[in-house]
Structure formats: structure tokens, C-alpha cells
Image: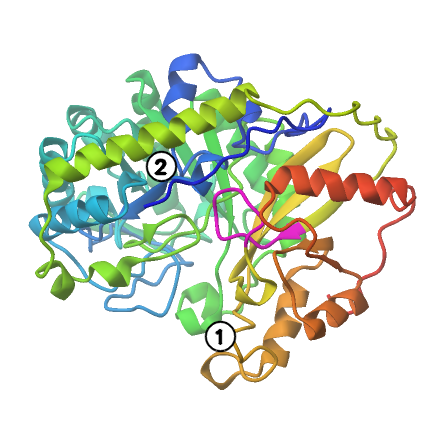
Amino acid sequence: MDLPVISNTAPASGGGCSSSGCGTAPDALSHLPDHIRAKVQDHPCYSEEAHHYFARMHVAVAPACNIQCNYCNRKYDCANESRPGVVSELLNPDQAIKKVLAVAATIPQMTVLGIAGPGDPLANPERTFETFRQLSEKAPDIKLCVSTNGLNLPKYVDEIAKHNIDHVTITINCLDPEVGAKIYPWIYWENKRIRGVEAARILIEQQQKGLEMLTARGILVKVNSVMIPGVNDEHLKEVSKVVKAKGAFLHNVMPLIAEAEHGTYYGIMEQRSPTAEELQAIQDECAGDMAMMRHCRQCRADAVGLLGEDRGAEFALDKLDAMEIDYDSAMARRKEVHDAIIDQLEAKRAGQGAPLAAEPAAPLPADSRPVLMAVATAGQGLINQHFGHAKEFLVYEASPEGVRFVSHRKTELYCVGGDTCGDEGQDGVSADSILDRTIAALAGCEVVLCSKIGYEPWGLLETAGIQPNGEHAMEPIEEAVMAVYREMAEAGKLATPAPDQKRA
């Protein structure tokens, strides 16, 4: 297997994240103590840089849940949705171990195993901790993580520490029980179903207590929050302040997923999701208090592979039986792969081997306006994907301070085969309809960078006020974004307001 190539070219002057921080790039982690930064800078779920190179997987061993969220509808035996709470197969601990070993042998970049559902791992403690116990013995090179709603967290902090789980995610959507009552219809607590404000109060107390206990033990805590317009959106900045004060090192504000077809209460009641602009605004406000995670994909509870991809179908139970796994040999290969990636990442971070520029780049005018650019990428931090093959676009902001990652935007495949672009999309949906939705998803972006793009989407993007650019194929993303930004500055396009987007 070929290793990813990581450019060692140093960024232009002013490159990297702006002072507001992109949340997970190296300089946004610089405020962390060395021992914490060392744990998270190569973790794909925490580091925006590392997620281009390292993979993760979740095992679905925890079916039961002890709370009900208005944004959640757990689905089993489902391969058609990509969101938390959804799985194709429920596993027992022995099946989970077999799957992990198979994935780790097949995808040597896989470094992290998480248990995140489809219910709550700590509402299924026997299944959860038996899985972690076996993994610690059989695959000690894999980092272990758990995600929880926090209701049972204080009860199991000792058990988490015992199993060497040093990364925990808690979903904390509010601090005010009145707000919480609009999000959580009920909790199951001390053998009773409790509803309303009292249920939210108990949940919030347990979450905060668990957070304090974990950080006192030196266990790293990331906080997830679901942004729900009109419910908790204005409240999330206070959440960010409080969880930072109590020791959480990263905050992940995620958009509500509320399409009616998912069958959630919010979906049925037509509670809207936030727009990309609203989500970015809240993330930017919260970023003043702590590092923000912006590359979350709201993964399924059985996700496998790099963030943004799902290879779970390759490792279904009926396929595992046919696999012969020599994990001792696989561990040796995994170490080679990991060491090579880390060496390249460290060289990149240190700027080693950067070619000398013929002359330093001229400084950009300080009053140049920021520009959002969408990027089609298949990974490795490169512009290496055809526009029509993208199922998501990464969005970067370029400004005189540098380049920062701000979000990802999901789309549908415009091209489903080599000769089908512009004809029919997926499931009988016309490619024109998909293209319209893709252009709408890119609202606010002024440039799209990709490896190739067809004639029709090129013209429609231009009509919508979005400039396609295929001139930087296979180049590192941040360098290409800054290069295009400089071209816009030289053309005098940064001193004027952003152009209107006619179809966005």
C-alpha cells in the first residue's frame, strides 16, 4: 500500500490559521500542554490535519439508551443513512473484536476505536467495557475512545480510567434545564422515567459532574453540542465558556440533522437545521473561548475508514468469517505505516525541506476581505477529486492572516460513472437537480477548487457567482487556497464586496 505524500512546502507568510483559530490545526492546539497536544495532534477525530491521513472506526455494541433526544431516532440494520444512531449490524463484544482486528489489518492507517452507540455506551456498561478489555489485550496499539450523553458518566469514571481510555466525548447541549426540556423529553434515572425540566436538570448535573471527574483524572474530554436554531443556538457560547473552565480541551458544535425522512421528533415537527452560515457564526463566537472542532462528520455508530468515508460494508459479519487475520504481522505493518505518516507530518509541521522561494511573497493589503473557497478532495490534504465525484466539499477561509478550515458541506454525487455526468444522477434523480442542490450547498463560497470539472457545471457555477478552478490539481489544499487568494488580490477583487450568488 502506498503511503500518503505530505508536502513539506512552508506556507506563505501569514499562512496557517488566523488568530481566531481553525480549531484543530497545529497552531490552534498550541495552547495545550505538550503532553495533551502529543495525544491529540495525530488523532483523526480531534485534529483537522490528522484526519486527512489517519482512519477511525466505531463498533456498534451499545443498543440501549437512557435518555430520549428530540433529534435522535436510532435505526438498526440500516445502510442508507449517515448520521449518529444508525447501524447496519449490532455486534456483541466478541464480534466487535473480530471486526476491529480485520479492519486494523486491512486499513493500517486506522488508529482509533470508538464506541458511540447506537444507544449510549454507559447505558450498556457490560458490553462496552468487555469490548474495551479485549481490545486492550489484543490490539494495544489502537487508541480507545468512548462517547456518552453523560447521564451515567460519574458512575463509570473509575472503569474508564481502568481500561486506559484517555479520550471521552460528552454531548452537552445546554446548561439551563428550561432549554434542556425542549431537547430531551425524558431520561431513565434510578429505575424511573423522569420528564421535563426535572429530567433536564438531572442530566445537566450528571454531565457537569462527570466532566469534572474526568479532567481531574487527566482524561481528555471533547464536548459535542448540537446546534438547534431557536432552541439552544444563543446558549452555546455559555456552554463553551463553562466546559472550557472545567477542563474540556475541544468543543464540537454540530448542525442539527432534521430531515423528516429520518423520523425524529424535530424532523416531524419541521424544526429546521441551521444554515452553513449560521453554524459558522456560532462556531466563530465559541472559538473565542476554546478550540473548536470543525471537521466532524457526525458519523454513524458503525463508521469505518477516513472521516468522510464509510467502508463498513466491507467488514460485514458474513464477510469477516472468510477473512484470515494474522494480527502480529498486521501490527508490524501498521507500525511502519504510522511511523511514516508521523515522520512526514512532523517534517511538515517543522517546515523541513521547504524549497527556497525566488523572492518572498508580497504582503497582502490588511483591508483585504476574507474569501470562502470550497475544495473537492479525496484525502491526504490534496486537491485530488473531480467536482462531479465529490460527496462533500471542504470549505476554507482565506484572509490576510492566512488560511483556516471552517466547515464541510455535504452534497450528492453529480457523476455516478465515467459517462453519466449530466444525464441521470442517483436513484432516478436528475443530474440537473443534484447540480442545483450542490450549488445551493456552496452558498457563500466564491471559488471551487477541484482536480477536474465538466463544461456544464463550470458554466452553472459561474452563473451562480462561484468561480471554478482546476489549475491546482494534486497541490496541498492550503497552499492552493492562498495562491488563488493572492491571484484575486492582484486582480483587485479583494477590495470590493463579494459578488452576489444568483442561484445559491
Residue 252 to residue 340: above or below? below
Which residue type does callout 2 highlight? Thr
Query: For this view, does 495 lie left or right of residue 389?
Result: right
Query: For this view, does 301 lie left or right of residue 89?
Result: right
Q: Residues within 10 Å of mark 1 (few under 14, many from 20)?
A: some
Query: For this view, does 152 lie left or right of residue 401?
Result: left
Q: Residue at x 17, y 39 (%)?
A: 330
Q: What's the magenta region?
A: 374-384
Pinpoint residue 83: horizontal percent, then vertical percent: 39, 58
Residue in the foreground of this view, choosing between 224 and 38:
38
Residue 74 to residue 146: above or below? below
Q: Which residue is tagged 2? A: 169
Q: Which residue is tagged 1? A: 416
Q: Secondary structure at mark 1?
A: loop
Q: Residues within 10 Å of mark 2 (few under 14, many from 20)?
A: many
Picture quadrant where residue 487 is located: top right
Q: Residue at x 85, y 56 (%)?
A: 499
